[in-house]
Amino acid sequence: MFNLLAWLFGLISLDIVIPATIPFLGWGNWLALPLIIIGVIFGALSSSTSGRNFCLIVLFVAAVRLSIGGGIF
């Protein structure tokens, strides 16, 4: 059940992160970060690791976009 929740949070945050790669929409990554962290927590509580790994990939994409845009020092 936790793995399904992790996938759900990962997919919702991915829907936010993809449009946030467009210039001037980088604030969407800050909106998606809490959702990604919740997904990683649910994935860590699960016996399967696929949801957690998916959320970590989405987190990596969001962090790279924020670092390119100057949002993370």
Image: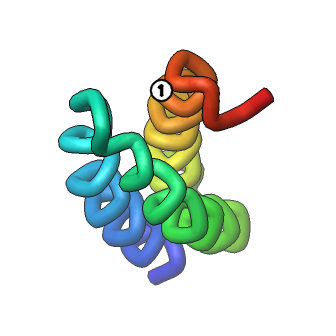
Instruction: Tell me where residue 64 appears, x and y as whole percent.
Output: 55, 23
| In-front residue for pair 9/47 | 9
Instruction: Tell me where residue 10 appears, x and y as whole percent.
Output: 39, 58
Q: Which residue is mark 1?
A: 65
Q: Is residue 47 visible?
A: no
| In-front residue for pair 65/13 | 65
User: In the displayed structure, does residue 6 sit left or right of residue 12?
Assistant: right
Q: Is residue 61 visible?
A: yes
Kindly give the residue lying farthest to the front in the view shown: 24
Instruction: Tell me where residue 19 appears, x and y as whole percent.
Output: 19, 42
Secondary structure beneath dot 1 equals helix
| In-front residue for pair 10/30 | 30
Kindly give the residue lying farthest to the top in the view shown: 68
To which quarter of the image does residue 12 belong?
Answer: bottom left
- Compared to residue 58, the image places residue 27 above or below, namely below
Kindly give the residue lying farthest to the bottom in the view shown: 1
User: In the displayed structure, does residue 17 sit left or right of residue 2?
Assistant: left
Q: How is the image coloured?
A: rainbow
Q: Amino acid at mark 1?
A: Arg
Residue displayed at 80% across by 28% down? 73
Disc tally is 1
| In-front residue for pair 38/68 | 68
Residue displayed at 40% across by 69% down? 9
How dense is the environment of label 1, judged by Cα within 10 Å: few (below 14), some, or many (20 and up)?
A: many
- Compared to residue 42, the image places residue 27 above or below, namely above
Q: Quadrant of the N terminus?
A: bottom left
User: In the displayed structure, does residue 33 sit left or right of residue 10?
Assistant: right
To which quarter of the image does residue 54 belong?
Answer: top left
Instruction: Tell me where residue 6 appears, x and y as whole percent.
Output: 47, 67
To which quarter of the image does residue 4 belong?
Answer: bottom left
Residue displayed at 55% across by 32% down? 66
